[in-house]
Amino acid sequence: MAYPDTGLRAEPASFRDPANRVYHHGDEVLRVLDERAAAEWRALAASDFFPALLAEGRVCGTEPVETAPVPEGWAAVLRHERIPFVSHPYEWSHTMLRDAALLHLQILRAALPAGFTTKDGSAYNLQWRGAQPVFIDVGSFTPVRDGEPWAGYRQFCQTLLYPLLLGAHLGLDFQPWLRSRVDGIEPDEMRRLFAGVRRLRPGVFTHVHLHDAMQRRNARASTADVRTQLRAAGYSRELALATVRGLERLVGRLDRQPPASHWIDYQRTCGYSAADRAAKESFVAGSLAAGPRARLALDLGANDGRYARLAADHADYVVAVEQDPAVVDRLYRALRAEGERHILPLVMDLADPSPGGGWRGVERAAFADRARADAVLALAVVHHLAIGRNVPLPEVVDWLAGFGAPGARLVVEFVHPEDPMALRLLANKPDGLFPDYRRDEFERLLGTRCRIENRLDLPSGTRTLYRAVVGG
């Protein structure tokens, strides 16, 4: 919902907690609180643990504001730092999801002794500054009441723990599961996947089978009834803290080494000569430096992040998109080790990018709606879409140009049909299927959407790089 007179826009993903809502005003991110939430915020800000989390960067920057153009009826307004790029958990790699889960548990472990808990445990409460996870749902903090369980336990299991169990114990990629269900994986579904001896794997019996059994037993009981039962059984804040510590130890062990993948060794096997690689890097760096510094750059088909790192020298923030979860996981681990805060790696099939999801299809915004960039790299991508995935070449060009705001720089590589990689893809297709896949046709199509400023034939003679300005 927009408020034209004020320039205020309601955040579509913020509606499930009626005590607070998030709005956008220009580049500002504002959270409004009702009377009860405002009182809880004041207590939270006065605590010892919360300012420390802010100072450490584990919770997004937050400060109260006295005046803001928000709807009437709210008791207080907070201003948050703006996260450079909003991503969704089904776009993360296994290690990214695990680090996000660990941060959530670490925050909860710090909050409980201070008398606070979190209302929910959703993976969507976390975002990223490059390779650093950050907790964003400040409105989730609430005073803890003895005898009450962690209200976010089910969400934590369904959106964080269960996907990690799939990867660590079964070697399955969790991304399709989370993409198809905004609320995550149900315990009953997990129970059937972890039947027989699989139930003995770490964390499965307690957090899948017992969890599912308790849900079934209490299916007709009210929340108040369950709380009364837990108090009568002696459930305490100390037990809650022990549970969180146990979850933290479990999640820390749910590692998944990236499996063998053709794309992990792509830089070695792709067939670029040393001269090709040097010329390509020089052209990309020069193209990125040819205009004003980009606020957001996209590297579509990023592989090991070689060119995303080049882009980071000329952009405030870089989103590096790669289809293979194993490749993204390796890249994330490298960026994390480097302390990188300006490159965000994401898992995504560019022929099937993240659609809008959740309530009315807008609660979780589609990738195309989030990714309006000032610089776009599309290196060794066009042939995979046009030949490998049968996407018509005009649509590929329109799609690439659509990521750039007017005036954005587009650096794109066209792999000629006689290139070894293109020949390998064409070998699996009927003869004559792609008569329009030619350099001259690609250049013509690119010129209809962009102003081509420069081009370079790589020394091998079978690939051409273009620098273009969107809408020029």
Image (spheres, grey):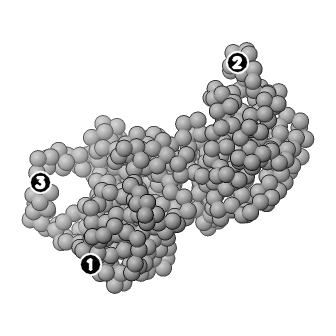
First-in-chain label (3 vs 1): 1
Q: Which residue appears at 36% of the width and 81% of the height? A: 45
Name the mark on residue 222.
3
- Image coordinates of residue 208 in percent, x first then y, are 29, 47
Name the mark on residue 39.
1
Name the mark on residue 433.
2
Tell me which amino acid carries mark 3.
Answer: Ser
Q: Which residue appears at 18% of the width and 49% of the height? A: 214
First-in-chain label (2 vs 3): 3
Q: Is residue 238 visible?
A: no
- Image coordinates of residue 390 in percent, x first then y, are 64, 26
Q: Which residue appears at 19% of the width and 71% of the height? A: 145
Q: Residue 54, relative to residue 120: is it above or below?
A: below
Question: Would residue 233 appear left or right of 66 to someone viewing this image?
Answer: left
Quadrant the N terminus occupies: bottom left
- Image coordinates of residue 321 in percent, x first then y, are 61, 48
Q: Which residue appears at 82% of the width and 27% of the height? A: 418
- Image coordinates of residue 78 in percent, x first then y, are 39, 74
